[in-house]
Image (cartoon, rainbow, N blue to C red):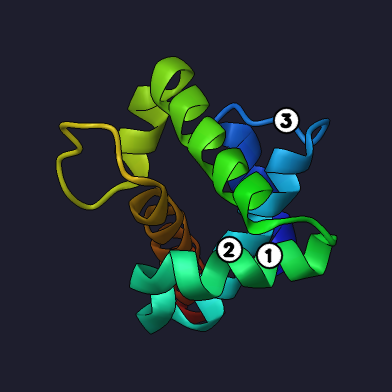
Amino acid sequence: MEMGDIYGLLHYLGLSAESTRFFHVSYAVYLTTRQPARTPFAEWWLYPAVAGQYHTCIFNVKRSVCIAVDQVWETEREALRSITKYPLKRKPLPSEFIAILAAYIKIRRAACRERV
């Protein structure tokens, strides 16, 4: 159900599954939920891993994440702010954006486990 949660979050933030960027971002969030300590190393670890999964180059993945950040910031800024645990006063960097989404997914998953 984790990928379903990630897809739902991306839809909530206004991203559409009609673009490869949606899947690049979703897989990056998925990997980050698995290894959050590696998030600061997006350029060296995360983007290459996503690129390998989708048989593309690192540049395309980085561009996908950057465009997604720009799109969400322009169209769904308040929705993004609603899922952060701190005031979001500026557009997040791509690695920050992925970390925000991954943290939100992990918090929701933990909350669901507590209810069970």
In this image, 67 relative to 92: left or right?
right
Mark 1 in CB contact with mark 2 (< 8 angstroms)? yes
On the image, numbered disc 3 is attached to which residue? 16
Residue 106 appears anywhere in the view: no
In this image, 86 relative to 7: left or right?
left
Secondary structure found at label 2: helix
On the image, numbered disc 1 is attached to which residue? 50
Mark 3 in CB contact with mark 2 (< 8 angstroms)? no
Secondary structure found at label 1: helix
Q: Amino acid at mark 1?
A: Val
Residue 56 appears anywhere in the view: yes
On the image, numbered disc 2 is attached to which residue? 47
Q: Residue 83: image x %, image y %?
A: 36, 45
The residue located at (82%, 60%) in the rendering is 54
Give me the C-alpha separation between circle 1 and circle 3: 18 Å
Q: Residue 95: image x %, image y %?
A: 39, 56
Please report whichever mark, 1 or 3, sits nearer to the chain's N-terminal start: 3
Q: Amino acid at mark 3?
A: Ser
Please report whichever mark, 3 or 2, sits nearer to the chain's N-terminal start: 3
Q: Residue 39: image x %, image y %?
A: 40, 71
Question: Closer to the observer: label 1 or label 3?
Answer: 1
Count of marks, rendered view? 3
Secondary structure found at label 3: loop
Name above or below for residue 89 compared with residue 48: above
Give the image quarter of residue 29.
Answer: bottom right
Question: Closer to the observer: label 3 or label 2?
Answer: 2
